[in-house]
Amino acid sequence: MSFEQYKEAGDGFYIGAKLVSEYMRKSYHGLLKHIINPSDRDKNLLGMYIRAMAWMSTIAILNKPEYFQAIVSGNRALLEIFVDMCLLSYDKTDSSILKMNWWEKSAKYKAAETLVNFYQRIGEAVPDEYQSELDFVTKNKKEIETKRLELWPNKKNTSRHPQNRWTGQPTLFEDIKKVDKHFGALIKEELGKSLTEFYRTEYNKMNWMIHGSALTGIRNFSTETFHCLCALSYELCSDLAMLCIKIIFFDYHFITHYPDSKKDWEELKNKRILSFGKACGCIDT
């Protein structure tokens, strides 16, 4: 492919990402925002959707290849958001909500405790500008350590923050396998592969593009390759965002109770295909 063809491909997938972003906003303001008496679980699921929608709004303004790091960051963020949405959707109890909320508090506590311990080790008082962190540690120490043991027990019976995932799993991969088990058909319909396969083939490459350590993933890249990278990343962002839409529609039963949802969904997919075809000169109309 020539430079111009790579650029056209990127333009086509970028237009598709903008279409998905617009659809997410339309769905939120037209349907999701008006859920009556949402439960805590509903509010959390909607909060994740809003975060995915915000990411797609960001992607929609990143229309140059030099933005590749931010675009790929969107890939990874949308993957992780989708996984959490699936886990929350599958668990109809309050168990996941409880873990999620306490994991957030535990993570904040760990960060504040690390700061306080730093000044204690060097024999200095915590500066006034960090008084809120010191107060947070003092106020929440007993409750958070108790909740850690209750929600994430371990063989040593020690109170520890579950480092990587609110589920207590050591990595995202364990949660992805669980998501595939429960939502495999839905995922394969959009991605053309399981989420497990997607993770094993794409996740490390995403990290290489994002992390600032050395030049892994981009060393010796040509200009054409950066255009290609952005094109694929726009497509992946769109696919993952559409999965986020689908899972919340599935959970809120819009697929059943909103007859036009399937038609709107197919129209969006067709518009994405047309936008790519037009940009690449494959389609004239």
Image (tube, helix red, strand yellow):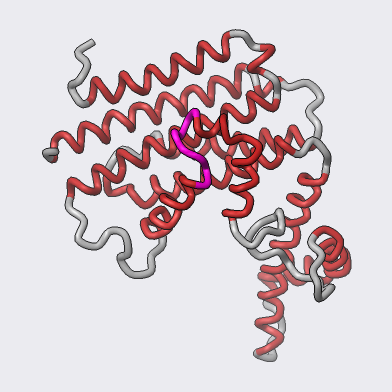
The range drawn in magenta is: 189-196
In the depicted structure, whether residue 154 falls above or below residue 14: below
Residue occupying the point 78% across, 66% down: 136
Answer whether residue 267 is visible to the viewer in this image. Answer: yes
State the image coordinates of residue 172 (x, y, percent, origin top left): 59, 54
Q: Is the magenta stretch mostly helix, strand or loop?
A: helix
Camera-side residue of 214 and 198: 198
Q: How many labels does the image show?
A: 0
Answer whether residue 57 is visible to the viewer in this image. Answer: no
State the image coordinates of residue 213 (x, y, percent, origin top left): 38, 69
Camera-side residue of 24 and 191: 191
Residue occupying the point 30% across, 38% down: 231
Residue occupying the point 28% across, 25% down: 276
Residue 1 inside the magenta-drawn segment: no
State the image coordinates of residue 252 (x, y, percent, origin top left): 70, 24
Q: Residue furthest bottom?
A: 123
Camera-side residue of 93 and 14: 93
Residue 115 occupies quadrant: bottom right
